Image: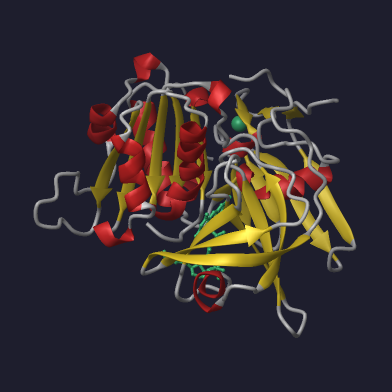
Amino acid sequence: MATPGAPLVAPVPLVWRLVTVVEVVDETPHARTLALDVPDWPGHVAGQHLDVRLTAEDGYVAERSYSIASAPEDARVALTVERIDDGEVSPYLAGELVVGDQFEVRGPVGGHFTWRAQDGGPLLLVAGGSGLVPLMAMVRHRAARASGAATELLVSSREREAVLYRDELERLASAEDGLNVVYTLTRSRPAGWSGYARRVDAPMLAEVGPAASASPRVFVCGPTPFVEAVADALVSLGHAAENVHTERFGPTGG
Amino acid sequence: MEEERGAAARDATVLDGNAIAALLGEIFGGSEMTSATRGCGSCGQSHPIGEHRLYRGAGLVLRCPGCGDVALVVVERGGEAVREVQLLGRWQVAVG
Ligand SMILES: Cc1cc2nc3c(=O)[nH]c(=O)nc-3n(C[C@H](O)[C@H](O)[C@H](O)COP(=O)(O)OP(=O)(O)OC[C@H]3O[C@@H](n4cnc5c(N)ncnc54)[C@H](O)[C@@H]3O)c2cc1C
Ligand SMILES: [Zn+2]
């Protein structure tokens, strides 16, 4: 645990910056990654997010938070947005928007739900749906810094097609540098599927490990009901509350 | 209070202190506040602000994850011209 009040992340002036979308990548049928050109980008820490502000022609303003998917070492800042069909903001970001479009962001912000290579491991990362985004930044950062911290990444998705960054995760895990990726599907079990096929529960977390006795730093992110259930299961397995970092995305996704 | 916590745990729209990192930065003059801890006057536990539960309605209410006690209330009045902030408990704010 950090010293109470120790500044883990330097203060960042909270200005709104107009960013330009330079690339759009379809990750799944419902999610897209947006690579951004951000003027005067101050750099970030894996796990941080941006606040995005959209202003309509009539002046109507909508603000939402989006985690940064890219590692601090990556050349471009990237967000991954999952489309909620009846949503206000995500259908634009993950649907209508095209390369060259602009919107405002402020940040990066956050310092509790962050990990830096020098923080070390072991790590247990538990992702529900788009909750994988900030954890992917950590995994990418880990690889970029050749950290070697023992890391278990447990990814929960509705179906195989909904898993974000599938190819990249496969590549990263095949390096056999201490990263292990485990999947669970909550709505389907494809033929030949060797991963889990149920919601994350205490027995699954115990199998995936690391055990509470190894005092892993745990990061849990996803829809609020997912985070609550996983956090309860972790506590029941004996993980100390101060080792468990949670971030709730609200009702969206799964 | 127990009943309130139960209801909160089932409410999918609840967020946490991480979601208002930027707002807290504004209130606390640019400090990163989600990793700051708050000692609760009600249950005596200390938790990072990022682990506190966030309820959004007409205003924002942040509650202790241990007991549900109110930690912060923010209400915007007259657009964003005035912001009313109420803080409870012992907030450990980084200096320098
Ligand atoms: C710190 C933080 C980081 C985040 N990072 C990301 C990220 O990296 N990627 C990402 O895609 N999202 C992320 N989110 C979620 C994001 O901020 C928005 O909440 C999300 O994109 C939905 O916004 P919207 O405007 O499309 O929907 P809204 O207009 O806000 O919501 C539409 C309506 O649908 C309801 N609703 C939405 N989903 C469901 C559901 N599954 N079941 C029932 N009702 C539902 C809502 O309550 C609302 O009534 C993050 C949230 C936080 C707090
Ligand atoms: Zn309390």
In the visual, does B58 lie left or right of A15?
left
Relative vertical location of residue B91 with respect to residue A191 in this rendering, above or below: above
Quadrant showing the N terminus of chain B:
top right
The percent position of residue A211, horizontal first and vertical second, equals 32, 20
Q: Nearer the viewer, residue B24 or A149?
A: A149
**In front: A34, or B13?**
A34
Regarding residue B6, the answer to whether it shows in the image is no
Q: Outermost residue toward the left?
A: A192
Q: Residue at x 46, y 69 (%)?
A: A83
Q: In which image quadrant can residue A28 be found?
A: bottom left
Residue situated furthest bottom in the rendering: A58
Q: Position of residue B85 (x, y in %)?
A: 82, 48
Q: Identify which residue is drawn at 56% across, 41% down.
A: A47
Q: Position of residue A223 (x, y in %)?
A: 44, 53
> Quadrant where the C terminus of chain B lies?
top right
Q: Using the image, determine if residue A114 lies above or below residue A177.
A: below
Q: Does A112 appear above or below A215?
A: below
Front-lying residue, A111 or A5? A111
Q: Which residue appears at 51% of the width and 53% of the height?
A: A249
Residue B27 in sight in this render: yes
Q: Is residue A222 left or right of residue A242?
A: left
Q: Residue furthest top?
A: A213
Q: Which residue is painted at 30% across and 44% down in the image?
A: A170
Give the image quadrant in which the ligand numbered 2 is located: top right
Q: Residue furthest right?
A: B81
Structure colour scheme: secondary structure
For this rendering, which residue is in front, A93 or A39?
A39
